[in-house]
Image (cartoon, grey):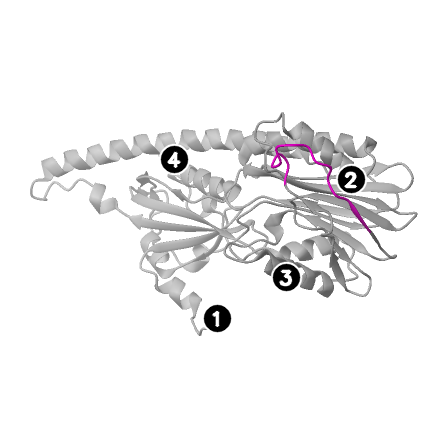
């Protein structure tokens, strides 16, 4: 593959001096370089397209050696978390290619790294390994071998202890991630059927997070052919931010059902947020769509403005009722509210700042990028448009902030 700069990355990959392999997320070899094949004594056809466990199984006669299974655990952890894992000194025996059933004792220093797709999800796993067998193997004919052997044995023992600690940490992280995902699913369920409205929702965590954060969305059917749509963003990541998010989302959902308009609902949320630790500086926006009058009333607490895509491809940002985030003002002040009209075929898009903001970039650049994407995909249904926005606006290396997105056709 040659890019615009004329660099042949396939040639670079094959020329790397270290043994390198690419895995799919289900642990199938996608590619390997020449150093890997030379180190393992295999041909390309014997490796590429095969599962790790099939290409290089553990020695069934020695259950104490579990190198392949430990490597599998590391790769699966990297795929699940999006985090790099530098394994400690690792014994991974390799079967002699010309002597079936005979394994050679080998030692490695592996590193496993995630490779992200345009949507921020892990699509490949890069595995690099250094063969350190000669460093560990005892050679009696070497001068001073006795002392060296003691040092190497101590190194191996310490490395094994570190590996065991790493495995326990990975197991604990996996349990925490399972709890986080269950919490996220409970607090951000897929929206139920809406009266004559079509909606799509998306949630994307930042790269390297637990897949749980403080971003939220909500859709609520109201009396009189009206629907309330909200998104919000609690400062921070992880379980603490998610717990605050759950409280605020529930409070705003309840307030939007009884308050006289979105501004009053956000006022109630602001008063409630003062009693919730960690809720300060939360941003939120609430829109109430009236299908009978074809109007959208909205109010924002320091949140990026909703985008209204008209049938002719024109985009308006609803930014005429913006106030500071929750908990910023020391005294209660009524929040502003604005209203705009829409025509049949319009689309309303609410989102959190992870969709548009980039480091060292003015927010207007991100808003222009969003407007351009909306115009190019004008006419798409909400599900298709939601996927297109994430594909267009997510950085190649993955999002550095969480993203919640709602696309609604009133």
Reading the image, the residue beneath label 4 is 66
Query: Of circles 4 and 2, which is in front?
Result: 2
Q: Main secondary structure of the magenta part?
A: loop
What is the secondary structure assignment of the residue under circle 4? loop
Position in image of residue 162 (x %, y %)? 32, 32
Instruction: Say which quarter of the image contains residue 363.
Output: bottom right
Image-based side of 146 in relation to 315, left or right: left
Q: Nearer the viewer, residue 128 or 344?
A: 344
Reading the image, the residue beneath label 2 is 262
- Region rendered in magenta: 325-339
Disc 3 to disc 1: CB gap under 8 Å:
no
Q: Is residue 82 magenta?
A: no
- In terms of sequence position, does the residue under pointer 3 or pointer 2 come before the other? 2
Query: Of circles 4 and 1, which is in front?
Result: 1
Position in image of residue 125 (x %, y %)? 47, 50
Q: Nearer the viewer, residue 306 or 45?
A: 306
Vertical relation: 167 (above or below) 144: above
Vertical relation: 400 (above or below) 189: below
């Amino acid at each position: 593959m040659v890019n615009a700069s004329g660099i042949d990355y396939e040639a670079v990959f094959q020329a790397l001096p270290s043994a390198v392999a690419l895995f799919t997320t289900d642990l199938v070899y996608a590619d390997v370089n020449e150093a890997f094949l030379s180190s393992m004594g295999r041909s390309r056809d014997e490796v590429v397209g095969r599962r790790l466990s099939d290409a290089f199984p553990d020695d069934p006669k020695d259950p104490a050696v579990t190198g392949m299974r430990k490597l599998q655990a590391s790769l699966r952890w990297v795929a699940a978390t999006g985090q790099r894992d530098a394994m400690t000194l690792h014994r991974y025996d390799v079967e002699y290619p010309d002597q079936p059933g005979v394994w050679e004792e080998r030692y490695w220093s592996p590193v496993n790294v995630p490779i992200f797709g345009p949507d921020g999800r892990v699509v490949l796993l890069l595995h690099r390994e250094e063969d350190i067998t000669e460093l560990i193997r005892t050679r009696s004919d070497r001068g001073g071998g006795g002392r060296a052997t003691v040092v190497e044995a101590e190194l191996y023992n310490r490395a094994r202890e570190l590996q065991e600690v790493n495995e326990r940490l990975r197991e604990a992280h996996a349990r925490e991630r399972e709890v986080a995902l269950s919490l996220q699913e409970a607090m951000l369920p897929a929206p139920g059927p809406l009266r004559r409205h079509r909606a799509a929702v998306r949630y994307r965590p930042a790269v390297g997070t637990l897949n749980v954060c403080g971003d939220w969305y909500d859709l609520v059917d109201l009396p009189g052919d009206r629907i309330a749509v909200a998104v919000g963003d609690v400062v921070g990541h992880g379980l603490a931010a998610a717990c605050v998010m759950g409280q605020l989302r529930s409070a705003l959902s309840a307030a939007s059902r009884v308050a006289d308009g979105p501004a009053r609902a956000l006022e109630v949320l602001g008063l409630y947020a003062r009693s919730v630790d960690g809720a300060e500086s939360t941003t939120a926006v609430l829109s109430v769509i009236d299908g009978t009058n074809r109007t959208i009333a909205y109010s924002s607490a320091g949140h990026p403005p909703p985008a209204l895509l008209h049938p002719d491809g024109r985009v308006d940002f609803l930014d005429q009722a913006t106030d500071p985030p929750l908990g910023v003002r020391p005294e209660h002040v009524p929040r502003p509210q604005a209203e705009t009209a829409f025509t049949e075929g319009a689309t309303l898009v609410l989102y959190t700042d992870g969709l548009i903001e980039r480091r060292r970039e003015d927010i207007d650049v991100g808003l222009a990028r969003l407007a351009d994407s909306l115009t190019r995909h004008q006419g798409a249904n909400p599900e298709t448009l939601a996927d297109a926005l994430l594909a267009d606006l997510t950085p190649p290396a993955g999002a550095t902030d969480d993203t919640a997105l709602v696309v609604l056709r009133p």
